[in-house]
Amino acid sequence: MTPKLVIVGTVALDDVTTPFGSVRRALGGSAFYGGIAASYWTSVGVVAVVGKDYPEEGFRILESRAIDFRGIDRSAEETFAWTGEYTYDLNTAITRDTRLNCLLSFNPRVAEHYPNPETLFLANIDPEIQGKILDSLPVRPRLVALDTMNYWIESKKDTLLQVLRRIDLLTINESEARMLTGEFNLVLAARAIRALGPSIVVLKKGEHGALVFYEGGVFASPAMPLEVVKDPTGAGDSFAGGLLGYLTVHGHHSPEFLKQSSIIGSVMASFCVSDFGVIGTRALSLEEISSRIREFGDLTGFRQIDYEERRL
Amino acid sequence: MTPKLVIVGTVALDDVTTPFGSVRRALGGSAFYGGIAASYWTSVGVVAVVGKDYPEEGFRILESRAIDFRGIDRSAEETFAWTGEYTYDLNTAITRDTRLNCLLSFNPRVAEHYPNPETLFLANIDPEIQGKILDSLPVRPRLVALDTMNYWIESKKDTLLQVLRRIDLLTINESEARMLTGEFNLVLAARAIRALGPSIVVLKKGEHGALVFYEGGVFASPAMPLEVVKDPTGAGDSFAGGLLGYLTVHGHHSPEFLKQSSIIGSVMASFCVSDFGVIGTRALSLEEISSRIREFGDLTGFRQIDYEERRL
C-alpha cells in the first residue's frame, strides 16, 4: 500500500559543529528529517539512496517511527556526507565539505514503490530529477510540494521554473526567494513565486519562523524562542515534514488547516533544533507534542481587540 | 491635569534616504513618533526640546492628536537633526550625521509639567537624565518604561544599570540586548535583563516583529508583511507608543492585556513604516485601525489543535 505522504530526498551522514558541540556522521538528510517529523501525523514513505557505509541504526529509527523505507536504495558507493558549521548566528550554515558519493547516481523509483501517494514532497534535489518523478507517476498526487536551494536557482533555473509550474506548495528560504524572483520585498517575492505555479509559498526565516502565503492571505508561523538551540540542521525539513504530514490528513487547501499545519511545522522544527541530528524528534511522546502545541498557542494567541470598545 | 501617559524623548528633524525615496527635515524623534502612536489609545503628554528652526507644523500635528505639549521646551539653538540611510535591508539604519544641537542642553522638567502620570516612558536619551527624572517625581508612576541604545550601553553602562533597577519595562533591540548581557541566545538575554530590574522586556526584531518576555511567559508579536515599506524610521517608537498607550488604559501587568498591547504596538509600527516620517500614523481613521487589528488576528491566529483528536 502506498503511504499517504511520500518524501523524495536525501539520507545523509552529517558532520556538524556548532558553538554548543559537534557530531560526526550524524544521521540526517532532508528525507530523514522530514519523514520523522511527518510520521507523527500520517503514514510516510521515503525515497532516497544510502551507501554501503550507512549504519543500521538509521533504518531502526525509521522502523521505530513506522516509516516505509522500501524506497531507499542501497548503493555500493559511500553515503552522501555533509560537513557544516554554525557560528553563534545559527541562521546560516557554513558548508565545509560536501561529498555527494552515492547521490551522484540517485535514480529515485517513486512510481515503482509508491504509485499513488496523496501528497508528494520533492525535497531539495536536482530539479531535473524532480520533474522526471512527476512524469513517472500514473496519477498526479493531490498535493505536490517542493523544496529547492540557491545552487539549483543558479545552475538550473529554467528546469526549476518548469517544475514550479507543476507543483502546489514551495518551501524556500528568504534569500533564495529573493534570488529566484529579483524582488527584495518578501510579499512581492511570494506573489511572484505564486505566479510561477505554486499556490502556497512557505518562506522560511530560520529563528524568525516562516511566512505562509496562500490564496487570499498570509500566515506568520512563529519559531519558539528556546533557551537551548544546539543544532539548526534539519529544521527546515522538520518544518516541512510536520506541515505536510498534518496537511495530508486534515485538509488540503483550507486556510484554517494550512495555518494549523504551519504551526505543526513550527512545533517539529522547535524539537529538531533543541538537539543534534534527530535526537530531538525521533522519540517524542504525545504529552511532549501536546504541551508544545499549547505553548505555541500561548506564544501568539491573543483575545481579539475591539477598537471601538477599547478606545478611551 | 497630567496626561495618563507621559513620554520623555526627542523631537527631531530627520533627513532620511531609503531605496524608495528620501525626505529632508521630516518631523520625527522618539517622543514625536511615540506620542502620535499612543494618542489613539490614551491621553499623552510629551517632554522634549526643539530649536528655533522647528516648524509650526510639528505642533499642529500634535494638536490634531490632542497631545499635550506643554512639556516641549523651545531653545534658542537649532533642533536636533539626524541624517540616516537605509539600504534594501530596512532593518539597519546607517547614520550619516547626528547634530545634537539643542539636545545638548536638554533639561526635561517632567515633574513641573506632569507630576503624576500613570505611565512614564523614558525614550532613548542619556540614562543620567532618565535617572534624574525618576528622582524628581513626587510619586512613582504605576508603570515606568525605558528605551536605550548601544551608545549608552557602551559609554554609560553603570548609570544605565542603576536606572534599569527602577523600571518595569525595557524596549531594546536584539543586538543591544546581546551587548548589554553578553548572552547571544535571546531567551537567556531577556532573562538576564529581567534579573537587572524590568519585569517586562520587549526585544525588538525589526521586520521580524518583537518578543515580549514577562513573568511566566513570552509573546511573539509579529510584524505585518507589507508590500510597501517606505521608511522604517520611528517603527520602534511607534511600537512602544502603541503598546504603552494601550497598556496604560487597559491593564498593567495582566499577560492578556500585555499581549493585546503588543499587537497594538505592531499595528502602529506597521502604519509607521508604510510611509516617510509620521505620514502613515498621524491621521488614521477608526476603520483603518480596526481593519489592521483584524489583519493581525488573521496573520497569527489559528484554531487550537487537539493532538489526540488530530492524530491519524
Image: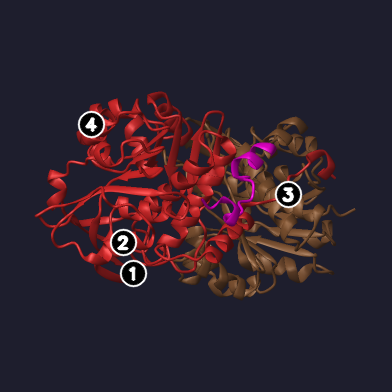
Chain colours: A brown, B red
Alpha carbon of mark 1 to alpha carbon of mark 3: how far? Answer: 39 Å
* CA distance separating discs 2 and 4: 34 Å
Which residue reaches farthest front? B1
* Marks 3,2: beta carbons within 8 A: no
Chain bearing tag 2 is: B
Which label lies toward us, 4 or 3?
A: 4
Mark 3, Cα crowd under 10 Å, few <14 / some 14-19 / many 20+, is few
The secondary element bearing badge 4 is classed as helix
Q: Same subunit under labels 1 and 3?
A: yes
Mark 2 or mark 1, which has the lower sequence index?
Answer: 1
Q: Earlier in the sequence, mark 4 or mark 1?
A: 1
Q: Looking at the image, which residue sits at the far right?
A: A1
The image quadrant that residue A171 belongs to is bottom right
Q: Are marks 2 and 4 on the same chain?
A: yes
Asked if residue A108 can be seen in this view, the reply is no
Q: Earlier in the sequence, mark 1 or mark 3?
A: 1
Counting other residues with Cα less than 10 Å from the Cα at mark 4, is it few (<14), some (14-19), or many (20 or more)?
A: some
Q: Chain of mark 4?
A: B
Question: What SS does tag 3 mark?
Answer: loop
Q: Amino acid at mark 2?
A: Tyr
| Disc assigned to residue B86 | 2
* Mark earlier in primary sequence (2, 4): 2
